[in-house]
Image (cartoon, helix red, strand yellow):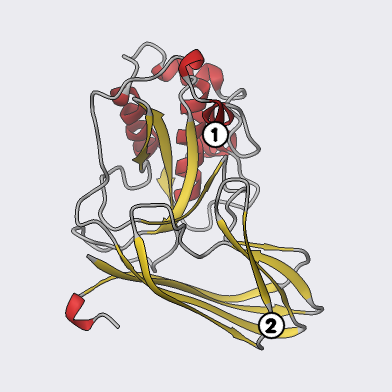
Amino acid sequence: MRVHVGSEFVYETAVPTHSVWQVEPRPDSEHRVLSEAWTITPDVPTHVYRDQFGNVCRRLTMPQGQCFLRYDAEAEVPGHADASDTDASEPRPEQLPDDVLVFTLPSRFCPSDVLADEAWNLFGAMTPGWSRVQAICDWVHAEVQFAYGSSSPVMSAADVFESRSGVCRDYAHLAVTFCRALNIPARYAFGYLPDIAVTPLDDPMDFCAWMEVYLGGRWWTFDPRNNARRIGRVLIGRGRDALDVAMVTTFGAPNLARMTVWADEIEVANAT
């Protein structure tokens, strides 16, 4: 299957402002980018690097005034939903690979030490493994109310637990936090998610956040916001929490005048 994904931003800056962008898909996920293009007006030089988590980051300095930035891509995605294995087991801490251990620790937006008692009270008596992680997703999906404007850039999973409201970023943070509190490795992920084989929502398209959990010797996708195995995810980034994969990081205070995101299935006959 093929999808058309991308995003567009209009920033207004009082002074030249350096920035780091994460809106380009990772090259090591199940999708395959077939074509991509950047449009930046005024034209400025950019520099691409990989961060410590392997995410594609692009640096540029927005000039004073208005800056228009657009990323557009066509990608090929598997025609099946997210993989699953209901028999996948939870490895004990001593069985975890070295590079997985970091995803068992508290982070800025996922304070698993703060919510440890709540996690163990809710899920500690459950059978370890896939079913317990799914129970965490079921609980977060049912207990947290999705509401635009209910979150903020500094809202942590502890805040979400108290308010019981947020956006997909907050659903992922809370589920990741519960998993880590139970010594289950979990990492934050975000990207483009088209409405394939589901009823489209009335809300405008946006970036989507989910989590990846280490069970049975590999990472698996779980989506507490949608709580469904979905088709067509195009992964942009993964890290400890949203701080590691902010779509735009600015070294200053520019005004975001407009942001648009798209992720749509396209017919192969119409692919360009």
How many marks do you count on the picture? 2
Task: Look at the image and tell me whether residue 167 can be seen.
Answer: no
Which kind of residue does numbered mark 2 sit on?
Answer: Val
User: Is residue 271 depicted above or below 233 in this figure?
Assistant: below
User: Is residue 259 depicted above or below 184 in this figure?
Assistant: below
Given residues 133 and 217, the one toward you in this image is: 217
Of circles 1 and 2, the one toward us is: 2
Residue at 58% in and 33% down: 158
Q: Is residue 31 left or right of residue 170?
A: left
Image quarter in which the N terminus is found = bottom left
Say which element carries label 1: helix
Residue at 20% in and 76% down: 268
Q: Is residue 152 left or right of residue 86?
A: right
Give percent across and percent down for residue 234: 38, 58
Q: Which residue is mark 2?
A: 44
Residue 216: name its quadrant.
top left
What distance separates the C-alpha of mark 1 from that of mark 2? 44 Å
Residue 60: name its quadrant.
bottom right
Image quarter in which the C terminus is found = bottom left
- Residue 12, disc: none
Which kind of residue does numbered mark 1 sit on?
Answer: Glu
Give percent across and percent down for residue 153: 63, 52
Say which element carries label 2: loop
- Residue 162, disc: 1
How busy is the neighbourhood of tag 1: few (under 14 within 10 Å), some, or many (20 plus)? few
